[in-house]
Amino acid sequence: MSRVYNFSAGPAVLPEEVLKEAAAEMLDYNGTGMSVMEMSHRSKAYEEIIQGAEQDLRDLMNIPDNYKVLFLQGGASQQFAMIPMNLMKNKVADYIITGQWAKKAYQEAQVYGKANAIASSADETFSYIPDCSDLPISEDADYVYICENNTIYGTKFKTLPNTKGKTLVSDVSSCFLSEPVDVTKYGIIYGGVQKNIGPAGVVIVIIREDLITEDTLPGTPTMLKYKIHADNASLYNTPPAYGIYICGKVFKWLKKMGGLEAMKQRNEEKAKILYDFLDNSKMFKGTVRKEDRSLMNVPFVTGDADLDAKFVKEAKAAGLENLKGHRSVGGMRASIYNAMPKEGVEALVAFMKKFEEENTK
């Protein structure tokens, strides 16, 4: 069985050379005579793995010294609660609702304080990013929250919202490391790794040190305090050790590929191939306003549910996997993360052309 082109939104495609390296080290990591899966997280060998991963991530993103990097569990969804528990000092936060994950985070925050939806694109099925240049930011807001790239709907903030001096918190799960970012513009930038970085089970939180305090909401569990994890260098409890090891390998691969500037160019080139086809196709249509299109997740439809289903089935038979759209949107979605080669996108477009010819009466 040869490898397929995997367009899954997450868990998603990983770089082939990373998988091969991990396979070669499965029984004996670096002369230890054991797999990283079997290794004590307190061992010297593992300490080098997690510290190396953190350093490579710092290098890739130019993370300033006054930000901590935490490798945590619970996925991005656990951060929906962890963020208000740690940051809601005034019990007020502003949320910009651009999709299902931002909405879930907003709903979770309501458990802990007053969460305000200050902008939303729900009126047009989240197919655009609202204008965030002059928002009604609450005077006593502890932070302003966004989901920067919307995996399901295929939108991306190209300009960060004007938070009027308030701390910006951003979920970057599906655009993590896809392009350079200025970390200093955020109080917290975080994401689950299973889309663009590694296997499911790890969430990376990059948090400014002044936001890490003892002063959490009453009843906050020990495991949900940033300070506990920061003070213990992500080793308070057994971390998702193997997942972090794979993330570390992906960071090294990204460095080898030329870093985030090079990835951005590659990703723009790949996305252009697909979007250009969609813009000229008679059968397939993109669903997102042009200026708000994601480089990572590309939803598209034929306008006919039966035809969509036929397309997904025939694409799978042709080695193009996981193209079915999210159940809340329907249609198709191609997730073309860092590890998706350009050839994969070209193969998809070639298949779409063929399908269009064969199914146009």
Image: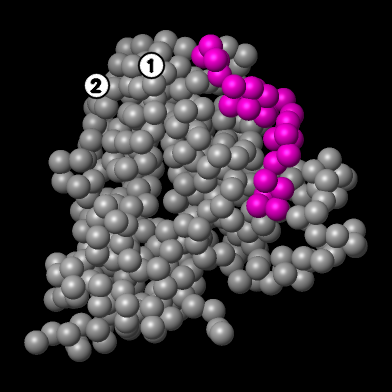
Image coordinates of residue 2 in percent, x first then y, are 55, 84
Let me know if residue 51 is in the magenta part.
no
- Name the amino acid type tagged 1: Gly
Left or right of residue 92: residue 34: right
Q: Which quadrant does the N terminus fall into?
A: bottom right
Left or right of residue 246: residue 118: left
Let me know if residue 233 is in the magenta part.
yes
Mark 1 or 2, closer to the camera: 1
Image coordinates of residue 68 in percent, x first then y, are 64, 32
Q: Residue at x 50, y 61 (%)?
A: 12
Q: Which residue is mark 2?
A: 136
Q: Which quadrant does the C terminus fall into?
A: bottom left
Residue 162: quadrant of the picture: top left
Left or right of residue 121: residue 296: right
Q: Which residue is mark 1?
A: 113
- Mark 2: few, some, or many residues within 10 Å (few <14, many ≥20)? some
Whether residue 180 is visible here, answered yes or no, is no
Specify start and end residues of the magenta stretch as a single range.
216-244
Specify the label residue 71 is tagged with. none
Image coordinates of residue 350 in percent, x first then y, are 32, 83
Q: Residue at x 85, y 60 (%)?
A: 34
Left or right of residue 206: residue 264: left
Q: Residue at x 32, y 12 (%)?
A: 139
- Name the amino acid type tagged 2: Pro
